[in-house]
C-alpha cells in the first residue's frame, strides 16, 4: 500500500515554513524517486510499488509541482531544488538513500550527487540526455508556451495538446517529427499529466528549464559516486541518450542497456537497484 504524507521544511517559525508532499511504501534501505516535470509523485506510483519490494521507496512532489509548496526563493537553476531535497532527506532521517531520477529528476539527482556525495549510496538515472547547445536553444524557444488562464479557455486546449503529444513526439510541439512512441497512452495518464500542468500553473517550466540546461555530459563527469545510466531501446529520448556512449566518463558511471518493453525495463531496473543497495 502506498501512503501519502507531508514534511514541513524551512525555518523554526510558521512564516518561514513550507511543506513537501510525498508518497511512500515499503521498509528498509531508503530509495528516493524523483519524477519528470511537470508531473508529480503520482507518476511514480508503479515504480514505488516495484522499489518497495527492496526497501523504503519515497517519491516526493518536486517543490512547485503536485501538492508540494513552491520554493520560497526566486533563485534560478537546480541548486534551490538540491538544497530542498537535502533538507527533505535530512528531516526524514534517511541514511544514504539510493536516488532514482527520470528526466528532470535525473538532472536533480546528478546535482545532488555532486553536492552531497557522502549522503547517497548511488544514482539511477533514467532519460538523461545530451542536447547540443544549438538544438537545445531551438527546442526551448517553443517547448514552454505560456499557459496563463484565458477568458476563452484556450489555455486548457493548449495544455491538453501538450499532455497528449508529450507522449508521442519529441519535442512535443513538432508533429512533423517521427512518432517516438507508438504505444497508445491511456487517457487517464494524459488527463493526469494535463492536471499536473495546471496544478504547477504558469511556473510549470521552472524546474523543467533548469533541467534542460543541465543535459550535457560534463555535468555527469563531476560525479564520484556509483551512477547507473539506464538505456531503453524504446525510450522517447533514445537519439539523445545514445550520444552519451561517446562521452568520456569515469569508471563509477556505467551504462545499463535494456531491451524494449515494460517487462525488460522493470527487470533491468530491479537488477540495477540491487547492485546499489
Image (spheres, rainbow, N blue to C red):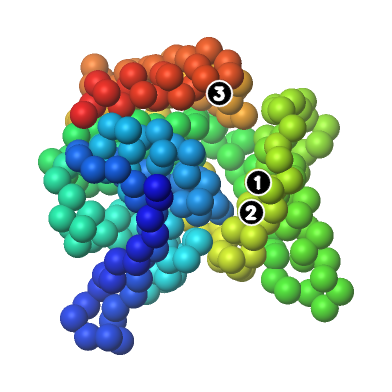
Q: Disc 1 marks which residue?
A: 189
* Tags 2 and 1 touching, CB below 8 Å: yes
In terms of image quadrants, where is residue 268?
Answer: top left
Image location (x, y in percent) of residue 204 = 57, 61
Q: Disc 3 marks which residue?
A: 262
In terms of image quadrants, where is residue 223?
Answer: top left
Please give the name of the residue rendered at 64% of the width and 64% of the height, measured from the top-left corner: 198
- Quick check: 211 left or right of 6? right
Neighbours of disc 1 within 10 Å: few (<14), some (14-19), many (20+): some
Label 1 residue SS: helix
The one of 267 and 2 positioned closer to us in this rendering: 2
* Tags 1 and 3 touching, CB below 8 Å: no
- Quick check: 58 left or right of 168? left
Quote the CA–CA distance across marks 1 and 3: 16 Å
Image location (x, y in percent) of residue 243 = 50, 20
Please give the name of the residue rendered at 30% of the width and 27% of the height, measured from the top-left corner: 273
Please give the name of the residue rendered at 23% of the width and 54% of the height, measured from the top-left corner: 89
Q: Disc 2 marks which residue?
A: 192
Residue sitting farthest toward the front: 1
Image location (x, y in percent) of residue 220 = 33, 32
Label 2 residue SS: helix
Q: Earlier in the sequence, mark 3 or mark 2?
A: 2
Q: Quadrant of the C terminus?
A: top left
Amino acid at each position: 500500500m502506498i501512503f501519502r504524507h507531508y514534511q514541513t521544511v524551512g525555518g523554526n517559525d510558521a512564516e518561514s515554513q513550507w511543506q513537501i508532499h510525498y508518497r511512500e511504501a515499503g521498509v528498509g534501505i531508503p530509495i528516493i524517486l524523483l519524477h519528470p516535470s511537470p508531473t508529480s509523485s503520482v507518476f511514480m506510483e508503479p515504480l514505488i510499488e516495484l522499489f518497495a519490494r527492496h526497501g523504503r521507496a519515497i517519491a516526493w512532489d518536486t517543490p512547485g509541482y503536485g501538492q508540494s509548496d513552491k520554493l520560497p526563493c526566486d533563485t534560478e537553476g537546480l541548486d534551490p531544488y538540491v538544497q530542498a531535497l537535502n533538507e527533505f532527506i535530512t528531516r526524514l532521517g534517511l541514511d544514504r538513500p539510493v536516488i532514482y531520477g527520470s528526466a528532470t529528476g535525473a538532472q536533480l539527482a546528478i546535482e545532488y550527487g555532486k553536492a552531497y556525495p557522502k549522503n547517497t549510496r548511488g544514482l539511477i538515472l533514467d532519460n538523461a540526455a545530451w542536447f547540443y547547445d544549438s538544438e537545445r536553444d531551438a527546442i526551448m524557444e517553443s517547448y514552454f508556451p505560456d499557459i496563463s488562464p484565458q477568458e476563452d479557455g484556450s489555455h486548457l486546449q493548449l495544455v491538453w495538446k501538450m499532455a497528449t503529444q508529450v507522449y508521442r513526439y519529441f519535442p512535443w510541439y513538432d508533429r512533423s517529427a517521427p512518432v517516438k512512441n507508438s504505444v497508445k497512452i491511456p487517457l487517464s495518464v494524459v488527463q493526469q499529466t494535463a492536471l499536473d500542468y495546471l496544478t504547477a500553473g504558469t511556473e510549470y517550466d521552472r524546474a523543467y528549464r533548469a533541467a534542460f540546461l543541465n543535459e550535457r555530459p560534463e555535468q555527469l563527469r563531476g560525479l564520484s559516486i556509483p551512477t547507473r545510466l539506464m538505456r531503453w531501446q524504446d525510450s522517447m529520448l533514445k537519439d539523445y541518450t545514445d550520444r552519451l556512449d561517446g562521452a568520456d566518463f569515469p569508471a563509477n558511471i556505467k551504462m545499463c542497456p535494456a531491451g524494449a518493453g515494460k517487462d525488460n525495463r522493470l527487470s533491468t531496473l530491479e537488477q540495477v537497484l540491487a547492485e546499489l543497495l
